[in-house]
């Protein structure tokens, strides 16, 4: 038995040795080609993934998370997802994202319009708060909460990132829970005090993930944010930069500080192109893989509202306001 084994080993060793040179052949000529090919392949494999897609099917998000988890393990993946017209949609147009956008536009373009529910932006926010408190919401796809749960069950960290301010936290948490979502159980842990806090300090560049140049472009809109139960409420600020400020505060379960590089991949889902683009731009130089997914399931409802005369919503708010004024002490 030893002889055949030995012959076999010799054959392997010989196969690993460079082939004997023919007379006049130069060794250096042939060698670089395969090395160059290997180098090119290595560079391509190391470059972070950048994916930007639009889909009306949340299962595309599930597939993307699974793809990144297969590459980096589930613990290396962060899913970031919007609320309005993504996790939840209003049961009627009144109080919806598209209704708020219409009212906000009217305030700027036609401030004397009889269709306005308030005289100014703070007044509009107050009405929005009333409607959030009273309205029910539903997932754009019935099985969307199950998709989220499946993602959480494999060990992926999740964050809800909304432009709503903390004033609307109670209503958001109520409707998320009523529809079967639980983001507390898979939340990103951060090193920050509870309640409201400023996402960055203009006097301390790089302290919370943002350079002085970026801070210069967004500091005029600086507003308090809150993060609790996996829900990050950012009060209309730049979602890409708000995500950076959250990642800069991330801590692992053992409580020791560590950097966002611990995550190897981010999947960001939002119904607005503006936000997917901003996240794409903000993380452009990140070593993490990134998939930004514009979720378009509610596009038809939004377009139908925009094309309508809005009479139903105008009359609906007037009836509701009369009822509130009549029944409740002001
Ligand atoms: Mg939205």
Image (cartoon, rainbow, N blue to C red):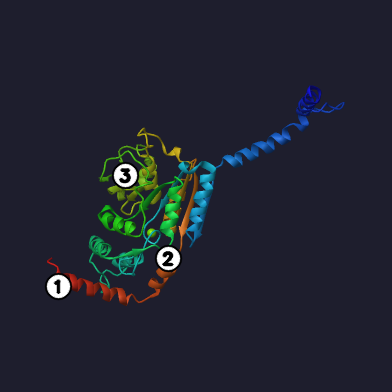
Q: Which residue is mark 3?
A: 199
The reply to whether dot 2 and dot 3 touch (C-beta < 8 Å) is no
Task: Indicate the position of residue 275 as horizontal and vertical percent values.
Answer: 42, 55
Outermost residue toward the left in this view: 329
The first of marks 1 and 2 along the sequence is: 2
Label 2 crowding class (10 Å Cα cut-off): few <14, some 14-19, many 20+?
some
Q: Which residue is mark 1?
A: 326
Residue 134: image quadrant is bottom left
Q: Nearer the viewer, mark 2 or mark 3?
A: 2
Task: Indicate the position of residue 281 as horizontal and vertical percent values.
Answer: 46, 49
**Which element is circle 2 on?**
loop
Q: Which residue is mark 2?
A: 298
At 44% across and 46% down in the image, what residue appears? Answer: 156
The first of marks 3 and 1 along the sequence is: 3
Q: Between 179 and 44, which is closer to the camera in this rendering?
A: 179
The residues tagged by marks 3 and 1 sit, at their Cα atoms, a distance apart of 41 Å
Residue 324 in the figure: left or right of residue 166: left
Q: Between 102 and 252, which is closer to the camera in this rendering?
A: 252
**Which element is circle 3 on?**
loop
Location of residue 231 with respect to 108 vertically, above or below: above
Label 1 crowding class (10 Å Cα cut-off): few <14, some 14-19, many 20+?
few
Task: Indicate the position of residue 298 as horizontal and vertical percent values.
Answer: 42, 65
């Amino acid at each position: 038995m030893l002889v055949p084994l030995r012959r076999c080993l010799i054959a392997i060793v010989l196969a690993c040795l460079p082939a004997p040179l023919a007379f006049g052949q130069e060794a250096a000529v042939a060698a670089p080609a395969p090395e160059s090919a290997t180098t090119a392949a290595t560079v391509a494999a190391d470059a972070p993934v950048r994916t930007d897609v639009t889909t009306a099917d949340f299962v595309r998000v599930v597939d993307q998370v699974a793809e990144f988890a297969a590459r980096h393990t589930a613990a290396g993946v962060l899913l970031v997802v919007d609320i309005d017209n993504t996790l939840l949609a209003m049961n009627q147009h009144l109080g919806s994202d598209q209704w708020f956008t219409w009212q906000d536009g009217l305030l700027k373009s036609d401030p004397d319009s009889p269709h306005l529910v308030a005289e100014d932006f703070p007044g509009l926010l107050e009405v929005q708060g009333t409607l959030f408190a009273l309205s029910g919401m539903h997932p754009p796809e019935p099985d969307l909460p199950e998709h989220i749960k499946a993602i959480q069950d494999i060990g992926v960290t999740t964050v809800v990132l909304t432009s709503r301010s903390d004033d609307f936290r109670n209503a958001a948490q109520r409707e998320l829970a009523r529809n079967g979502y639980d983001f507390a159980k898979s939340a990103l842990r951060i090193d920050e005090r509870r309640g409201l806090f400023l996402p960055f300090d203009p006097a301390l560049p790089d302290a919370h993930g943002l350079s002085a140049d970026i801070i210069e472009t967004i500091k005029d809109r600086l507003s308090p944010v809150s993060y609790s139960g996996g829900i990050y409420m950012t009060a209309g600020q730049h979602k890409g930069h708000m995500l950076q400020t959250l990642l800069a505060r991330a801590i692992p379960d053992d409580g020791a500080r560590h950097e966002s590089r611990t995550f190897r991949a981010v999947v960001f889902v939002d119904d607005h192109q503006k936000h997917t683009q901003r996240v794409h731009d903000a993380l452009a130089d990140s070593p993490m893989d990134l998939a930004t997914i514009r979720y378009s399931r509610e596009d038809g409802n939004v377009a139908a509202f925009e094309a309508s005369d809005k009479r139903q919503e105008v009359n609906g708010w007037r009836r509701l306001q009369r009822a509130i004024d009549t029944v409740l002490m002001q």
